[in-house]
Image (spheres, coloured by chain):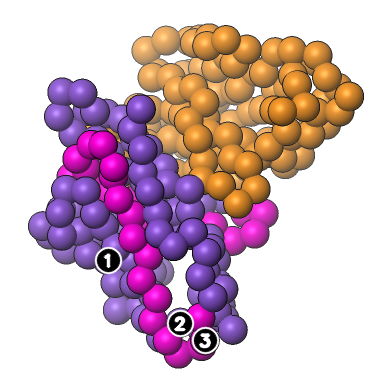
Amino acid sequence: QQQVKQSPQSLIVQKGGISIINCAYENTAFDYFPWYQQFPGKGPALLIAIRPDVSEKKEGRFTISFNKSAKQFSLHIMDSQPGDSATYFCAASLALTGTASKLTFGTGTRLQVTL
Amino acid sequence: GAVVSQHPSWVICKSGTSVKIECRSLDFQATTMFWYRQFPKQSLMLMATSNEGSKATYEQGVEKDKFLINHASLTLSTLTVTSAHPEDSSFYICSALGQGAAWANVLTFGAGSRLTVL
């Protein structure tokens, strides 16, 4: 029940295109859904996060869409750039306080943006 | 912004030796820190939750006697891999949850520490 499923495993998008990564969760008690970007040999960096009381959140070129009834959320990267090439992880936690903030990560999506 | 520093960033050790990895919150205090392990091309798996002044809580399947965690202050947690073996070679990443008015609900990851056991 703690699983977070992520797809696709890898994604190739042309420069300027839209990258879409999807995640699904099982535990309805999850209350915080972040997306992380990770470059090789580096720790994950928070991109954007959402709580289940909103259906969409946009920050610059990054948008999270959240479907509470379907228990799914997705990351859209608009106008994808070669510098966006990285591995993206969705995650979920019960809260963002104390020990409840431990994250369950998705399996990751390797994004490659081509010229 | 909040910064979490891990040291060392890369360590090579011989099989059977112990290695200590430090995780420091540089400009904020963190009552709670988390330790993750990541194998190549795989996701991050939570190993344990570290609370300042108390014993760490380990996830199922993680040997607490092998992976010793100490959270002695509000800015430092350490992970010691005892009697390391080649299968312990991995990327170890910590995260810290800020506390206080400025950093409450801010969860920051370190840059990771790559351990290679020969």
**Among the two numbered marks 3 and 1 on one chain, the one whose residue lies closer to the N terminus:** 3
Local crowd size for mark 2, using a 10 Å CA cut-off: few (<14), some (14–19), many (≥20): many
Q: From what the image shows, is residue B90 above or below residue A60?
A: below
Position above or below: A76 against B67: above
Front-most of residues A69 and A87: A87
Question: What hue represents chain B?
Answer: purple
Type of amino acid at the residue the image marks with label 1: Ile
Tell me the magenta residue range: B13-42
Q: Earlier in the sequence, mark 2 or mark 3?
A: 3
Q: Quadrant of residue B41?
A: bottom right
Per the model, the C-alpha gap separating discs 3 and 1 is 21 Å
Mark 1 Cα shell of 10 Å, populated few (<14), some (14-19), many (≥20): many
Determine the residue positioned at 89% across, 24% down: A115
Q: Is residue B100 magenta?
A: no
Where is mark 2, residue-wise?
B84
Q: Amino acid at mark 2?
A: Ala
Distance between mark 2 and mark 1 Cα atoms: 15 Å
Residue B69 circle label = 1
Residue A71 position in % (x across, y down): 50, 26
Residue B88 locus on image (x, y percent): 51, 75
Q: Colour of chain A?
A: orange
Percent across and percent down for residue A46 are 48, 30
Q: Residue at x 40, y 54 (%)?
A: B6
